Image (tube, grey):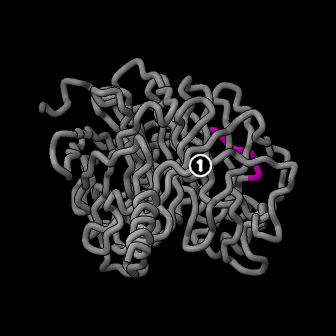
Amino acid sequence: MRIWRAALAVLALTASSVWAAPPGVTLIGKGSIAGTALDKSGLTGNICQASAPTNCIPKATLGGLGSALAYSGHDNVFVAAPDRGPFDGLTDIEYPDRVQFFHLKLDVNAPLPNIRTTLLDTRLLKNEHGQTLVGAAQAFDRRFDPEGIRIGLLGTLLISDEYGPYVYEFGPLGRLVRRISLPSRYAIQFPSGDPTLELTGNTSGRQANRGMEGLAISPNDRFAYGIMQNALLQDNALTPGTIDRVSVHTRVLKLDLLTRKTSEYVYVLEAANRGQGVSEILAVNDHEFLVLERDNRSYSAATPQAPTRKKIFKIDIGPTTTDISAVDGIPAGTATDPLPATIVPVEKALFIDLLDPSFGLNLNDAKAIAEKIEGLAWGPDLPDGRHVLYVISDNDLNTAIATQIFAFAIDPTVVDLEKQFQPLPLFPRRLLPRD
């Protein structure tokens, strides 16, 4: 009997140590935005799936905004960027790209859910000619797939484009200021509206729908960091002769916003199966970042499956990290084809496992964690000095699925956070909701 009791005690201790939330990290907030909510674009009419004309949503649907989230630095005002639109961008009418301005109010003294969201404004994104950028795959001259957003020093919006990939800079009203081209190795030669054709018709460049998924900006506003969702094609991304994703080596691009000089580094994914890849990167300071990895599984998905990875890692691009700007053709990273000894990837350590049972987010019911957890943003600190990290999901503009928002309190001893300085409010204070 004593042996059994001792064994049970050991098991209990082991379980608690495995399941315990990281020290200094506490889930303090939950919120949601209904999939049926409408934005303030003023758009009327519907957008329908090209192959299923009766499957439609309003043009003004407020969704997809979890693709990218950034804090303005003032007044609990955040800006979010929906991606290319509903139905994987295959629509009968082009989806006008836009950004959404939100007021997020976190009440730490209230029971969950305790994040109140107020939509402040919707602004359509336009190119330098005043034409609205669109997410529909057929509009190659104007097609745009926003996946990461950060705010520059003067209130401009830096947005990474998955199609190009490029980094675009917009004025706060949504007008394009400049396009920042990336090294040519990131582009594909033969774009197509069919992802399979893009994969089979190209031997180099980003994978279809797996381009620059995340974007960070350094605290001094000098550098942007874009991260690819998965490996470039020439980096042995696919099993030869197939479109099966295999490589765990993707790239982080450092971009000098003044000189446009670039550096590149290897980020090693946990796995490449089950739709796994990188969804976001967020600066902690000038060399450390948070990186979000996820699979595309959820109990709430169209085909419910248990998720295995919704993790946030802390990485360090230090002085020993190898600049691979001159390297074309990184091994896939299997057991028989590892990274060469000459390439040192970014340092990486687990920061938050969103599936940790202690958070209670991975439930097999209507409250199941979303399939596509995609956005990260720092918010204003708590009165006690703890930092607040917001995590948001992308509902793919599916009106049947809500956008999920989580807030985590991070003790200052856990991260050496250096926040970006924003001199001016991005949204007029007189128009903010009153508490």
Q: Nearer the viewer, residue 88 or 68?
A: 68
Occupied quadrant, residue 77: top left
* Residue found 47% across the figure and 27% down from its top: 419
Residue at horizontal 52 percent and vertical 64 percent from the top: 137
Residue 19: x, y in percent? 41, 60
Above or below, comparing residue 4 to residue 311 in the picture: below
Q: In the displayed structure, does residue 282 sit left or right of residue 65?
A: right
When the figure is inspected, residue 318 is found, relative to residue 247, above or below; the finding is: above
Note whether 224 is above or below 347 in the view shown: above
Residue drawn at x 53%, y 65% is: 138
Residue 181 counted in the magenta span: yes
Left or right, 369 with respect to 44, comes to: right
Picture residue at 19% right of the left edge, 29% below the top: 431
Q: Which amino acid does label 1 sit on?
A: Ala
Highlighted range, magenta = 180-185
**Which quarter of the rendered picture does the N terminus lie within?**
bottom left
Callout 1 secondary element: strand
What residue is pinned by disc 1? 349
Q: Is residue 260 left or right of residue 303?
A: right
